[in-house]
Image (spheres, grey):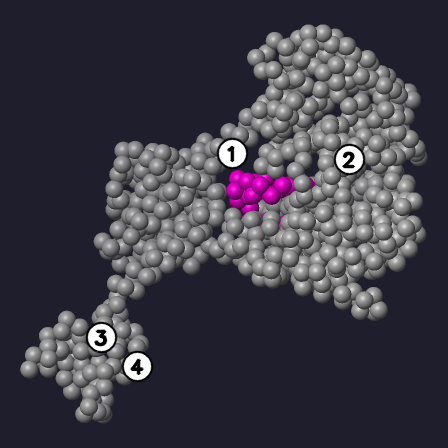
Amino acid sequence: MVAVSSWLRSPCPALVIDASGAVHSMNDAAKSLFPQRIAPHWRHGETVSVAERSYAVHRADNEDGSATWWLLDETDLLLERERAALLTRMSGALMMSLNPERCMTVVAELAAAHLADEVLVIAPPSVDGHPVTRCRRGEPPTYELRHVDVEAVAGLSEVLRGFPPVPSQWIDPAVAPEWLARDVSSIVVTPLPGHGVPAGALILMRRGERFSEGEEAFARLFASRAGVAISAASLFTQQAVITERLTRDLLPPALRRYEHVELAGRYRASGDTEHVGGDFYDVHELPDDQLFVVLGDVCGKGLDAAAQTGKVRTAVHALLQVVTDHDKMLHALNQALLTTDESRFITTVVGTVRPVDEGLHVTLTSGGHLPPLIVRASGAVEVAATKGTLVGILPRIVTATDEVVLAPGDSCLLYTDGITEACGGPLGDEEFGEDRLRRALTGCGGMPAEALVEHVHMLASHWIGGGAHDDMAVLAITAPRRRTS
Amino acid sequence: MKAVDDLWEAVLDRDEHRATDVVLAAAEDHGHEVVLLDVIGAVQQRVGREWAANRISVAQEHAITAINDRAVTALSITRPRRQPVHGRVTVACVDGEWHALPARLLAEVLSARGFAVDYLGAQVPAPHLITYLHRTGPDVVALSSSIATRLPAAHATMTACQATGVPVMVGGAAFGTDGGHAKRFGANAWAADARSAADMLMSQTLSRPSAPHQPIDDLPHLADQEYTLVSRSARDLVRSVYRELEECLPAMKSYSDEQRQHTAEDLAHIVEFLATALYMNDDALFHTFLSWTGQVLDARGVPSRVMEPTLDLLAAQLRDFPRAQRMLKLRSCADAQ
C-alpha cells in the first residue's frame, strides 16, 4: 500500500508516538534529524528548535491511540519574516528624517541590533572630518566628526567617493586600523549607494561567528535602502544650505539698539513655506549718529518679488554713499529701477533719524507708500504729511518730505499695506483699514518699539484669522524714555 | 518675594531701566533661574491674571511683556557662557501663539542648565519649524502654547514634529493644568512649568516617537466632522447670528461702530472656543470660557444677558451637530454651578 509507506519517505520529519509517550517509529527524515533516542514532550502547533533549525510541530491522532507528529521546517520563513520586519521598521524610521546625522544613527542602531555586534557608519568627509556613527549592540550610538585615515582600509576611499563601484569586502581584522576596530573577528565593508551622491559605508563587525553568505546578501539589501535615505537627507541638506546662503541677504536685517533710538521690525511673508517676500525694510548708519531707514513693497509677492527687494536694498545702500537727500535718493532709485529689465515698481518710504535735545528729529519721505503714523506717548496719533509718486514706473517723480520730532516715548510707525489691507475681521469680509489701525494705536502711547510692532502685527493677524494674507512688514522708530532717577 | 512687587511696579510704569535694575539685583541674591521663573515668570503670570480680569488691555500686556523681555536679555548677557553639556533642544511657540515669553524663559533656563538651545520664538509657521528640525536634528523639541484656541494647531504641529522622529515636549496654559490635552495628543512629554521641564530633560531621555500617525488617530471623535464644519463656516455663523441678534435686541441698532466690532468679536470668540471644544470633545473647555466671558462682559459693563440669546441662536444654527448641541445645552447646568 503506497499510502502507508509514503510517510516514511516524506521529506518532512515525522514520528509516531504511542499513548505512553514513547517513540514508536520515525521516518527517514526524522531519523537523520534525531540520531539519538528522544522522548519528546511537544504541544501541538508550537515551534521547537532542533539542530539550529526551527520546526513547527503538528499532531495527527491515529485510531490506535498513538499520534503521528509532523515537523515542518520554518527556519527560512521565520528568517525572512524577521528580515522583512527589520526592513519595514528601517524604512519607517529612515523615511521620517531628512537629517543625515539622524539617518546614520538609525542605520547604525538597527544594524547593531540585527546584523552585527558592532557597526560603523561613515560618510564622505566634510572640512571638519568624516561624520562617523558607531554603535555596539545594546549600547546607545555615538556620532562624531573625526579625521580618519580611510586609505588604511582597503576599498574604503572608493566607497566614500562612490566611484568606481566596489562590492562588499572582507577586511582582515588583524590589519584593520585602531580607529576602525578592536577585538573583532570579522569585518565586512558594504557601500551605501547614494545614487548621484555617495552616502558612505556601512561597516559590520562581529566578535564570534563569521557572516554567512545569506547574511551578507541581506546586509547589501539593508545598505541599499539605508544609502537611499542618507543620500536623500544629504541632498536636502545641501539644498537647504544653498537656499539659506542665497536668501540670507534678503531676510529682514536684525535690528540693534542704539543709544538714542529704539528700532524694532516685524516681518511675515505671505507664504508659510517662505522666509522672504516682496516687503522689505533696512536700516543704515550715517555719520553723526544719524540713521537712514527704508521700508517698502515691491509689486507682486513670492520669491520673484523677494529677489527684487534684494536689488532695491542693495541699490539704496549704494546710493546712500553718494546721496542722503530723500528727494535725490528717490529720483536716483527711480532711474535705477526704470533702466533694469524687470518692470516691477515699488512703493517705499524713507526716513532719516537724528538725535536732538528734545528726542529724535525724523525726516520722512514717501514714494507712493502709506504715510507713516506718529504715535505720541499720550496716545495721540498723527499722520506724517508726506506723499509722493510710485518709484520705478514714471520717468519723473514728485515727492514731499515731512519733518517730525519724537519726544521720549513717541514712536514713528512705518508699515506696508499687508497690514491695512488685511481682509477678514469677525464678519469675515472687511478690510482692517487705516482708520482701525489708527484707532488701535491710540491705546499704544509710550509703548516700547518691539511691543508696538508686535501689537500691530498681531492685530492684523487676528483680523485675518485663518485666512490667507499678504506680505507684512512693520517698523517702529521710538525715542526711548529717559532714565528717571 | 519683594522683587516681584518691585518689578511689577516698574513694568506697570513702563520703566525699563528700573525693571532691569530690579532683575539684575535680584539675580545677584537669588541666582538666574529663580529670577527668570519666580520673579519675571511670576510677574508675567500676574499680567495674565490682570488681563483675564480685564484690568489691563492687550496693548498694555504687550508693553509690559516687551519690558520683561528686555530684562531677560539684560539678564542673559550677564550669565556666564558655558559649553553645552546636555542635549540639543529646539524651543518654539505654536504658530498663531503670541505669548513668546514663557518659551523664552524655558530657553534661558535650559541654556543656563547646560543644554544647547535653539530658540525660535513666537509665530513660527509649521513648515519653517519642520525644516529647522531636519536641518539641526535636535534631541527634543519643546512646544509652547498659552491659548486654548491654538490647540488644534498645536496638535498638528506636534504630530508633524513627531513625524520627523523628534520627541515633543509640550507646555503652557493651553494644555490644561494637568496636561490632560497633551496626553490625548500623544505628546512624548508634558511639563507644568519651565523648572519641571528642565528637571525632566536632565533626568531622562525622551523616547523617540513611533511610526508617523494621523492626528485623527489621537482623537477619533473628529470623524463626525463637527469641528471641521463649524470651523470652516465660523464666519458665516458669526454673521448670521449677529444679524439675528440685532433683531432680538433692538438696543444693538444704536450701537457705535466700535461696539458693533466688539460684539462681533465676542461672537467670533465664542464660535472659536466652541470649535476648539469640539476638537477636543471637551465640554468643560467651552463652559469655562463662557463663564469667563460672562465675567469680562460684566467688567466691561455689557449686560451678560446678551449671552443667553446668542447661545440659543447658535444652537439653532447648529441643529444638525449633536456634540455642539450638547455643549450649547449643558451650559445652563454649568451656569447654575
Question: Residue at the spot x=71%, y=20% of the render?
Answer: A347
Q: Which residue carries the number 1 mark?
A: A240
Residue A322's spot in the image, x, y percent? 70, 8
The residue closer to the viewer here, A475 or A466, is A466
Of labels 1 and 3, earlier in sequence is 3
Label 1, label 2: how far apart the Cα atoms are: 36 Å
Which stretch appears magenta? B118-143
> Would residue B241 be seen by someone viewing this image from the given angle?
yes
Whether the magenta-drawn stretch holds residue B260 is answered as: no
Neighbour tally class for label 4: few under 14, some 14-19, many 20 plus, Cα within 10 Å: few
Residue A27: image tag? none
x and y, in percent, of residue A38 in the image: 20, 82
Q: Are marks 1 and 3 in contact (CB under 8 Å)?
A: no
Q: Which residue is mark 2?
A: A432
- Circles 4 and 1, Cβ within 8 Å, touching? The answer is no
**Which of disc 3 and disc 2 is earlier in sequence?**
3
Same chain shared by disc 1 and disc 3: yes
First in sequence, mark 3 or 4: give its number: 4
Do the residues at pointers 2 and 4 share their chain? Answer: yes
Q: Along the polypeptide, which appears first: circle 4 or circle 1?
A: 4
Could you say whether the residue bearing mark 4 is in a helix, strand or loop? loop
Which mark identifies residue A43?
4
